[in-house]
Amino acid sequence: QVQLVESGGGLVQAGGSLRLSCTTSGIVFSDAAMGWYRQAPAKQRELVAAITTGGGVDYGDSVRDRFTISSDNNKNTVYLRIDSLKPEDTGVYYCNAKISSLFQAAERYWGQGTQVTVSS
């Protein structure tokens, strides 16, 4: 059974920092491209950070200078550090694992999300 469990969210003041964690089980972590998505109130879920199986990273334009994604293959965990938090960072942060195959459609798995609330 595949599980992605996010943690690390909470209520923080603007200007602060957070580190979110997503621990996986049931997948070969090193075969998965991992992503962090954010869903703000009344908005669509958006990709904010991603890390490939080769360690390449990319970020949404609006968060590029404040978000850092990293992973630890030994712990089957992906992290998202958020610095200089802004009220507009408020939302539910979801972890996603994508496992690609040449012979079938990619498998995608989601965590349950962790709430981040930034007060001004």
Image: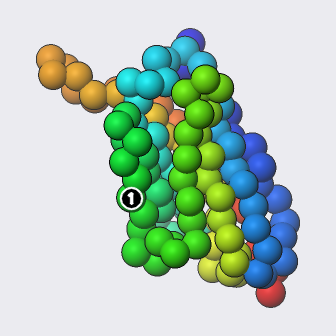
Q: Where is residue 24, by image quadrant?
A: top right
Residue at which label 1 appears:
58
Q: Residue 73 at x, y = what percent?
A: 55, 27
Give the camera-side residue of 23 and 54: 54
- Which colour assignment does the render follow? rainbow
- In this view of the protein, can residue 46 be seen by the observer? no
Which of 45/32 is in front?
32
For the point 72% across and 54% down, the residue is: 19
Residue 86, placed above or below residue 23: below
Identify the image quadrant of residue 26. top right
Residue sticking out furthest to the left: 103
The answer to whether 88 is drawn above or below residue 36 in the figure is: below
Q: Amino acid at mark 1?
A: Asp
User: Mark 1 Cα within 10 Å, few/some/many (few <14, many 20+)?
Assistant: some
Residue at image coords 27%, 28%: 100
* Residue 83 showing in the rendered view: yes
Q: Residue at x 84, y 77 (%)?
A: 13
Residue at the image position 36 percent from the left and 48 percent from the top: 56
Residue 119, image x and y in percent? 81, 80
Q: Quadrant of the N terminus?
A: top right
Query: In the displayed structure, does residue 7 sit left or right of residue 62?
Result: right
